[in-house]
Amino acid sequence: MEDGTSCAPGSEKVTEEQCAPVCGLVRDVLDRIGDKWSLLVLNLLSGRTMRFMDIRRAVPDISQRMLTVTLRHLERDGIIKRTAYPTVPVTVEYCLTPLGTTLIHSVIALVRWTAEHEREIAAARSTYDARLEEPILLQPRDRAARLSG
């Protein structure tokens, strides 16, 4: 960690020893919430309970295995609640927990921001990608200059 880098907003200077436990948890939770599928799933569960297959249909690009893994991680962190009913086949429903409900406002804001700036993000990506496709021109150097330099 660089000198003066803080672990928490508003912190003056935090040592690595002070920051390590908190930063590790923050990084772990942000990795989980910010993964490819969690934000979409959380947004879907905002204010409603959904069955597994309903979530799967609402997010068509996700595999059954990846949805299962995503839901298990969110359940482990206490963000969603899983309820299984003894039917044949088993019916499983998911909803936000009170903890998940506190997170949903931030999730919705992030999803809304992404939707509002979709064109700008796409344009920035195109500009960046086009730059990568341009050949890198190396300036010819005098052999003597290279050997002496």
Image: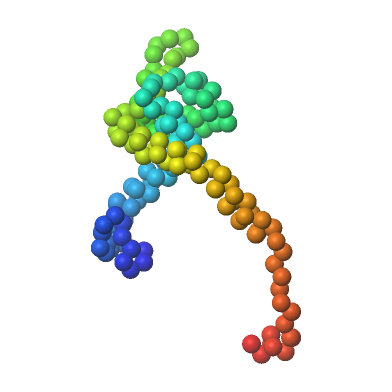
Q: Residue at x 50, y 20 (%)?
A: 53
> 141 and 75: which one is in front?
141
Query: The N terminus appears in which quarter of the rendering?
Result: bottom left
Relative to residue 141, is residue 131 depicted above or below?
Answer: above
Quick check: can you spot residue 76?
A: no
Q: Residue 78 lies in what quarter of the image? A: top left
x and y, in percent, of residue 46 in the image: 38, 28
Q: Residue at x 39, y 21 (%)?
A: 49
Query: The C terminus appears in which quarter of the rendering?
Result: bottom right
> 60 and 128: which one is in front?
128
> 74 and 131: which one is in front?
131
Relative to residue 88, is residue 140 depicted above or below?
Answer: below
x and y, in percent, of residue 12 in the image: 25, 63
Q: Is residue 14 left or right of residue 66?
A: left
What colouring method underlies this structural image? rainbow
Q: How many marks?
A: 0
x and y, in percent, of residue 88 in the image: 46, 9
> 36 and 124: which one is in front?
124
Q: Residue 101 lies in what quarter of the image? A: top left
Quick check: can you spot residue 127?
A: yes
Q: Residue at x 41, y 27 (%)?
A: 45
Relative to residue 112, is residue 83 depicted above or below?
Answer: above
Q: Residue at x 36, y 39 (%)?
A: 106
Q: Residue 79 lies in what quarter of the image? A: top left
x and y, in percent, of residue 37 in the image: 49, 36
